[in-house]
Amino acid sequence: MTQNDESNGAPKGLVFNIQKFSLHDGPGIRTIVFLKGCPLACIWCSNPEGQSTAPELIYTSDRCIGVEDCDRCVAVCLEQALTKDDEGKICVDRSICDACGDCAFVCPSRALEESGEWVGVDDVLRIVEEDDAFYARSGGGLTVSGGEPLAQDAFVRALLGAARNRGIDTAIETSGLCNWKTMKAVAPLTDRIFFDIKCLCPEKHERVTGVSNRKILQNFRRLRAEFPQVDVVVRTPVIPGVNDSEDDILAIVEFVNDAGGASAYELLPYHGFGEAKYTKLGKRYSSSRLRPPSDERMTALQRIATRCDASPSRTWLSRDLAPKDPKDPTDVARNEASSR
């Protein structure tokens, strides 16, 4: 399926999560729509289920009842991708699994779940508008995240445009890696853009994300030059050993200032809350040895970050010097939407 497979030609989007009551990705109480697909492969990514451009099967083994008591998933799998392991639980052969979702549909314990569903704009807005009263009271609205949402540009344009027409405040979180035509088309449709700048060194950027930052930095400059009225918040995930030196942050600050400044600059400390997701997807987490930056390190970096040309009343920086409790759903929601 593609972005334009609806019979009436309206685009559909591949969504892997809709998170309500977020307080950290734009003003007020917000609903975050997470879209699948990302051209980057950041070694610290906390949303690995957002990387692929196709639906995926998530397997939480400790939820599995066991094949002896329940073999519904094995029975419905036409590809024979599910077998019994030594503990009597399910083993997924991802080399032949086509993520059709049949096994997830019959799984009574939700050990098997499908990540990614094709939905229309009206389907998403129906969920978003359930919290209209909260948006009105708090100044909140809709934030589109990912993955990289601009990888599904047709759907994002349609979603943001429809939300705007209904009076919903809009925001988008982006890595900035897209063609300029896409960025130019989306910018007028959103009230604010959260723009990730991970580091300035092109070699380092390619080493830790798999791609060059040339297009990202070009897009930021053009965005500030051609859309100065758009509220742009720069974000930097602070990753130990990657970009946690004062020189790293100063280089970003100087670049942003030279490009025209930003509405705000946020530093987001690394966390490892997404590590368990890799196991559920049958992937290896390459940053398991990383630890969050210390409070002292974040404080030092914040001093550098205050040099960024930002609106004085909206220099948000990092609101937390260290990651919060992973058992707190509010903090988990915040961290799922950041540190991509």
Image: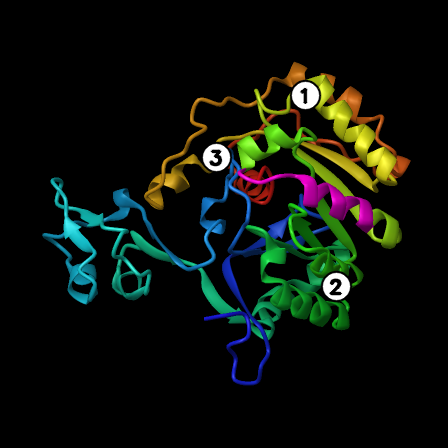
* Residue identified by numbered label 3: 273
Residue at 20%, 47% (x, y): give it: 91
Q: Name the residue under label 2.
A: 185
> Label 1: which residue?
298
Magenta stretch: includes residue 40: no
Q: In this view, does 63 lie to the left or right of 161?
A: left
Report if residue 39 is visible in the image: yes
Question: In terms of secondary structure, what is the magenta stretch mainly?
Answer: helix
Query: Badge 1: few (under 14), some or many (20 or more) residues near its Cα, within 10 Å?
Result: many
Q: Earlier in the sequence, mark 3 or mark 1?
A: 3
Q: Position of residue 330 (x, y in %)?
A: 57, 42
- State left or right for residue 302 relative to residue 312: left
Q: How far is disc 2 from disc 1 in space, using C-alphas?
A: 36 Å
The x and y percentages for residue 73 are 21, 60
Quick check: 204 above or below 184? above
- Residue nearest the viewer, comparing 214 with 232: 214
Q: Is residue 217 magenta?
A: yes
C-alpha gap between disc 3 and disc 1: 19 Å
Depicted 125 relative to depicted 180: above or below = below
Rendered image quadrant of residue 286: top left
Disc 3 residue type (three-letter): Phe
Mark 2 secondary-structure assignment: helix
How was this image coloured? rainbow
| Residue at the (55%, 75%) spot, across then down | 4
State the extent of the magenta-drawn residues as a range: 210-223
Q: Could one spot residue 269 in this view of the protein?
A: no
For marks 2 and 1, the one nearer the N-term is 2
The quarter of the picture where residue 205 lies is: top right
| Neighbourhood count class around disc 2 (C-alpha, 10 Å): few under 14, some 14–19, many 20 upward | few
Residue 33: image x %, image y %? Answer: 58, 57
